[in-house]
Image: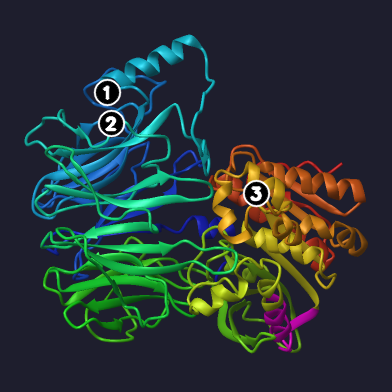
Amino acid sequence: MSEPFTIERMQALPRLSNLRLSPDGTRLVVAVVGIAPEGKKMATALWEVDPTGSAPARRLTRSVAGEGGEASFLPDGSLLFQSSRPDPDAKPDPDMTIDALWLLPAGGGEARLLAAPEGGVCGVVTARASNAILFGANVQRGATDFAGDAERAKARKESGVEALLFEDYPIRHWDHYLGPRVRRLYAATVPQGDERIEDARDLEPEVSGFTFEESESSISPDGSVVVTVRRVPGTFPETWDDLVAYETATGTARQLTNRDALYASPAISPDGRHVAALRLTYADPEHAEQLSLVLIDLETGEARTLAEALDRRPEHPTWGTDASTLYFESDDEGKRSAYRIDLPSGDVTRLTATGHVSDLCPSPDGKTVYALQSTIATPPRIVRFDARAADQVPEALANGPDEHGIAASSVVERLTATAADGTPIGAWLVRPPAASAESPVPLVVFVHGGPLGSWNGWSWRWNPNVLAAHGFAVLLPDPALSLGYGQHMLDRGWGQWGGAPFTDVMASVDAALERPDLDRSRVALMGGSYGGYMANWVAGQTDRFRCIVTHASLWELVGFHGTTDHGPAWEHEMGDPYADPSAYLRWSPREHLAAMASSRTPLLVIHGEKDHRVPISEALTLWTDMRRLGIPGRFLYFPDENHWVLKPQNARLWYATVLAFLDEHLCGVPFRPDRLLGGPIEVPAAP
């Protein structure tokens, strides 16, 4: 009999991401994340995998610090990667950690350092046919080069002042403040021999705080042109993500788009003539946003929309070997499918029909696509499929770092409910094999975040298989605002957060509980981020759940607008709160506090101090309201986590506490989270 699929067993599995194929098609490189030796953080190593499946996988990098996950190939097969490993030619400085740029030769051997600005390197992009590269670096405002940045950083440290003075907006992002360094973009050529990059060109020296913070870029095959996303602030709530082309030799900029939408994921064609990109049209409280795939002529600026008849949201455009073929991914009715566009004809083919497919890597001969694929029950693994055939089941490579597979024994089924307006509501049900009409099991409902999202693949943070191994069934519904079901699904819930999304969740729960193997008297609900919002909303609408877990949740939307890292973004859905706060008030769970106090459904509140997207103030206000009105519950606080719980010891505590809370209210087991932990972690009882 196999061991239960515990959080410890899940954490022992290799986490594969950022798959890359060498230019000659003979080597796959994948980032593999695991627990570092000291057990208190995750660390990444790069592995090489034989695309033919013949040779065993081998580890390419090994360092105490670990490597950045986004490696990039140069045309000769050498590999660029980021790492905070120490500079072998410099005196060790225990107070200095730099995420530097390194090169690993194609034939193996020692990696060599290419660039190490104090603020670190990020977002490295390589050219197809030259040694030209683009990278981001965080540099102090006013510094003209990396040496000047270091001087300013030294002066700041010696002054003992950590204050930041801002004049622009936003001032923070996800888990960090946008200062004193800001991200700039640098074009460079990788030198031969042991030389380091000394002549990187700053493409826009007078950059403001958020201009390139989340910028995505592409570089032409010959390295002469870079296309990047440049954020331009406008009148609130507008901000524009434009596409800008830079001549790398001179830094001359040329606008490709001009404040008509938000653009993302630019990808220059193999012939250097076009750039494919995603175009997100701005929404308003009456009309949901729309995402399309566009092709822009780099010479004329003429644009055309691709795959217009496909009612799906394209993501991650990826060129084939030549400029006639473009691939992309899209959420697709409980899956994430790979698609192919033949540009001369405009024909679109769905290539995969199962699982969650990502990291598309077309082979040089145009015959095969390599990718990562996961399912609700299996973590990402390397697969391959034909580059032309429709609706395939990808073939897994047996020689990857994940060759030992997964020990979960959950049963996964697809369910469909019907909403009040007749819309089908898809969901996944994950249950223990032993569930039966004679032994029905409790049901836990997971509501996804986003709110634009979908349950369609493996999750390391909200893994239903851990709960199934513990004896619970888990329902994963895709209500209104979910992706993969067409624009209509977004329109149904846009600006109506507690409307159709809530009734869709309840319809899915009702349908699932018609099954005799689920115990309709023992049901709980959980959610994080927008899912946490829904958890709070549900607590004020119904008393049918025995308990609720609310993680990184929104509670009071008027205050949230002013404290989140970019409040104006929410005005496109909820309107201007200064002129009319009615939507914020209407959909605030706090407005239903009296009903929560009446039903007295126990809540487990979870939040991280460093969360700037949904600030800790939301949880503090919720907890104060709960204590004030006597609503039963507990508060799990992480001083060292942000919107997600990332450290392995904290993740174990998260699962232990959640399972103990569910056991307490669904199974009558006294609350003791320490019983599930292998280490000495103790959780003090709530006063």
Q: Report helix, strand or loop for mark 3.
A: helix
Q: Amino acid at mark 2?
A: Pro
Residue 132 in percent (x, y) is at: 13, 44
Q: Height in image: 575 above or below 157?
A: below
Q: Does residue 398 show up?
A: no
Query: How far apart are labels 1 and 3 at the CA level?
Result: 45 Å
Q: Report helix, strand or loop for mark 1.
A: loop
Instruction: Give the quadrant of residue 395.
Output: bottom left
Disc number placed over residue 205 in the picture, else none: 2
Tell which of 244 and 471 is nearer to you: 244
582 vs 485, left or right, is right
Q: Which residue is mark 1?
A: 144
Instruction: Give the quadrant of residue 363.
Output: bottom left
Residue 594 in percent (x, y) is at: 89, 58
Q: Quadrant of the C terminus?
A: top right
Q: Which residue is mark 3?
A: 653
Residue range corresponding to the magenta coloring: 505-520
- At label 1, counting other C-alpha atoms closer than 10 Å, the crowd grade (few under 14, some 14-19, many 20 or more) is few
